[in-house]
Image: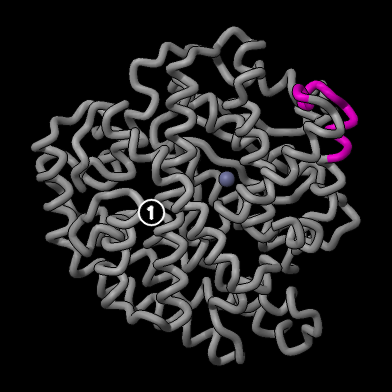
Amino acid sequence: MNIKEICRKLSIQHFRMYSGFSYSEEKINTYQKELAVISKRLIHKADDKQYKLWLLGNIAEYSQTKLFLQQIKERSKLHYKKINYANWKMWLPNSKEEERKKVLDYFIGNSSKIKKVLKKRYEKISEVYFRYGESVLDSFLTTENLSEDIFKKIKSLGIKYKPTFKKAWKTLGVSKEYWNEYYYLGSILYKNINFHLEPKKYVKRIYKSMGFPFGKIMVDDRDRKNKFGFAYCFWPNPPYDVRVSYKPVGGFNMFETAFHEFGHAAHAVSMSPNVPFWKRFEVPSGVAETFSELFESISTNKTYLKSINAFSPELQKRIELSRAKFLTFYAANSLVKYKYWSGEIKFDEIGSEYSSLLKKFVGIEPPEDYWLFHHILSEFTIYSPSYVVADMHKNWMLKKLKNKFGREWWNSRDAGSFIKSFMAPAYDANFMLGSTI
Ligand SMILES: [Zn+2]
C-alpha cells in the first residue's frame, strides 16, 4: 500500500469507530504502524520542510499510540457512582452543585496514573522530534506559518474578553466556583433557549447559494448505539470522500456545531485535486478551523438568525458569552501549552500554571490536576492555539466578505468563489492566511 491508501483507510476506520459501525482495532494498529514505517523511510529524502514535518508528525504519533490508549483507559476507569468520563458531559447540565464538586474532586484526586502516562507520552514525543533535529513548538509554528508573537496576541485577546465573560456567572445563574468549569458552563450555555431548527436544511440552502456541492458529502445524522462522537467531519480523500456526522439531539448548540462541521466539509470538497494528497489530508489546524469557524459564524449571525426567524435578544446574549468563554479559556489553554513546550515550565508545573492562568482569565482556580480532564489539553500535543489563530483568520475573512459582498454574504455565489480560492490550496492556504494576523 502507498502512503495515500494507508491514510485513507486509517481515516475510514476512525470514522467507523466514532460512528458506531464495525471497525477493526487490528487494522488501525497495522495502518498506523505502516504509516510510521513509510514516513521513516521517506523523511531522509524529504527536502521540503513542511513535508518533512508532516512525516515527522506521523512518526511521533505512532511512537506514543500505546501510551495514548493507556491514558484513555486509565481515565475511563474512574467512576464516581455511575459517573465516568464518557457520560460526565451528558450528566452535567442537570447535575446538582454538590454532586458536581464531588465528581470533579474524585476525578482530580484519582488522576495520578493518568498523569504518569501523559508525562511519558510527552517525553516520547519530545524524544522523536529531538532525534530528527526538530522541536515540538518550532514544528508547530512552522506548520502553521506563525511566529512566537502569536502567543502575545492570543493573550491580549483573552484579556480583551475578560469583562464580557465575567457576566456569565450572573447571566447563567451559577456561582463562580471551579466545579462550574468549562464543560459545565458549555452544557448550560443555551439552557432555556427555545430553539428547534434542524440544521441540515439550513446548511443545504447556504451551500446552494454559495455554490458548494452538498450532494458530494456523505452525511450521517442518525443516532445509533455505540456512536460516541457528538459531531465531527472526516475527510479520508478530499475532495472525493468527505463525511459529516452529528447526533440529532436538537437545540442551538447542535445547530451551531453542525454549521461548524459542514464548514469543514465545504473546505474539504473544495480542495483542488491537483494539490498533492498529503497537503489535502493534513491541513494545518489553524487553516482547517478557519472555514469551520467561518460557517459557524453564520449560525450565530444576528442578520442570519433574523432571516430564519430564530433570533431573540437572550440568544444573542448567550452567543456573546459563548465567544467570550472560548477566547478566555483558550487564552489560558494556549499559554500553558506555550510555557511547557518552550521549556519555561516543567511537566509537573503544568497543572499549577494552568490553574493560575484560569484564575487570571476566567476567575476560577481549580485544583492543579484539573487540566488532565480537558480533552484538548490532555489528548493533543499543542492544538489549543490553532482555534484562536483560526478565529483571527476568520475575522479577517469576515471583514473582506462583508466589504465585497455585503452583510448577507452567505447568499452570494461570488462570496462562495472568494472563500473557495482559500480552500482550494489546502495546506498552502497557511501562506495566504499567515500574513492576515
Ligand atoms: Zn473544527
- Name the image quarter holding residue 91: top left
**Secondary structure that dominates the magenta span:** helix
Which image quarter holds the C terminus?
bottom right
Colouring method of the image: one colour
Locate residue 366 relative to residue 318 in the image: left or right.
left
Secondary structure at numbered mark 1 = helix
User: Where does residue 302 sit, x and y in percent of width and height?
Assistant: 60, 20
Residue under label 1, please give it.
375
Three-letter code for the amino acid on which mark 1 is drawn: His
User: Where does residue 41 sit, x and y in percent of width and height?
Assistant: 70, 85
User: 210 or 366: which is nearer to us?
Assistant: 366
Vertical order, 3 against 385 (above or below): below
Q: Residue at x 81, y 58 (%)?
A: 432
> Few, some or many C-alpha atoms within 10 Å of disc 1 (few <14, some 14-19, many ≥20)?
few
User: 52 or 367: which is nearer to us?
Assistant: 367
Q: Residue at x 67, y 65 (%)?
A: 144
Question: Can the viewer see residue 31 in this picture?
Answer: no
User: 146 or 74: which is nearer to us?
Assistant: 146
Q: Residue at x 46, y 45 (%)?
A: 161
Question: Can the viewer see residue 159 in this picture?
Answer: yes
User: Where does residue 38 sit, x and y in percent of width and height?
Assistant: 68, 78
Counting labels gives 1
- Name the image quarter holding residue 136: bottom right
Residue 357 falls inside the magenta stretch? no
Which residues fall within the magenta stretch?
407-418
- Ligand 1 resides in the quarter of the picture at top right
Q: Residue at x 14, y 45 (%)?
A: 103
User: Where does residue 152 sit, x and y in percent of width and height?
Assistant: 53, 65
Locate residue 189 relative to residue 107 in the image: left or right.
right
